Amino acid sequence: MKNQLRIIGGEWKRRTLPFASIDGLRPTPDRVRETLFNWLMWDIQNTQVLDLCTGSGALAFEALSRGATKVIMIEPNTTQAGFLKDNIQLLKAQNCQLIVSTAQQALKKLSASSFDVVFLDPPYSLDLWQELAELADPMIVEKAYIYVEADRDLAQLKLPASWQKIKETKAGQVRAGLYQKMT
């Protein structure tokens, strides 16, 4: 069984993409995604983007649709990774790389990379915010934007002190914040 997500804006606006029905896999709600990309409207083009916990691919494909130069997706579930590969081919997204592994393993391989935008939206039940933030932080350039999504107050997540929250929204149980890395 599969579900579908809709790209909200950019080159692929209104395109629908399938994703697997897997426990805990929940795309960022349309309303939250729209808010996020309104926040990033002038800052997403020509960026190197890291999607730490890709899941459905909603954030990664939205970033590509809106002009990101390159997106690296990380997804450990092989079934969902198959959907992501198919969607990359369907969209002819040559500037997209999929790494099929856990975020922790992938970050070790990416240690020489640097990113302008990072999406940190792990499965809520795994409580990976702090661990992934600490592993990714050395690869995040100064003044980069980091989007964080959680099911709890963002102040509880123990994110790096150099990440300054600049925007925040709430939709139902979803708490979302946009941070900027400052030194």
Image (cartoon, helix red, strand yellow):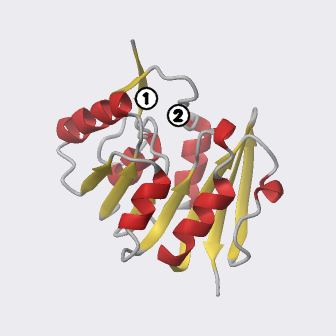
**How many numbered marks, from 0 up?**
2
Residue density around tag 2, few if under 14, some if 14–19, many if 20 or more, within 10 Å: some
- Mark number displayed over residue 5: 1
Residue visible at 45% across and 48% down in the picture: 102
x, y (%) of residue 114? 41, 75
The alpha-carbon separation of the residues under discs 1 and 2 comes to 7 Å
Front residue of this view, candidates 119 and 101: 101
In the rendered image of this protein, does residue 151 appear above or below residue 168? above
Q: Within the image, what quadrant is residue 129 found in?
A: bottom right
Front residue of this view, candidates 107 and 11: 107
In the rendered image of this protein, does residue 127 appear above or below residue 23? below
x, y (%) of residue 16? 35, 28
Q: Of marks 1 and 2, which one's residue comes earlier in the chain?
A: 1
> Could you tell me which quadrant the N terminus lies in?
top left
Front residue of this view, candidates 81 and 42: 81
Q: Horizontal placement of 40 versus 76: left or right?
A: right
x, y (%) of residue 42? 47, 67
Of marks 1 and 2, the one in the foreground = 2
Residue visible at 65% across and 66% down in the picture: 179
Q: Are marks 1 and 2 in contact (CB under 8 Å)?
A: yes
Residue visible at 33% across and 49% down in the picture: 65
Secondary element at tag 2: loop
- Mark number displayed over residue 27: 2
Q: Horizontal placement of 31 versus 157: left or right?
A: left
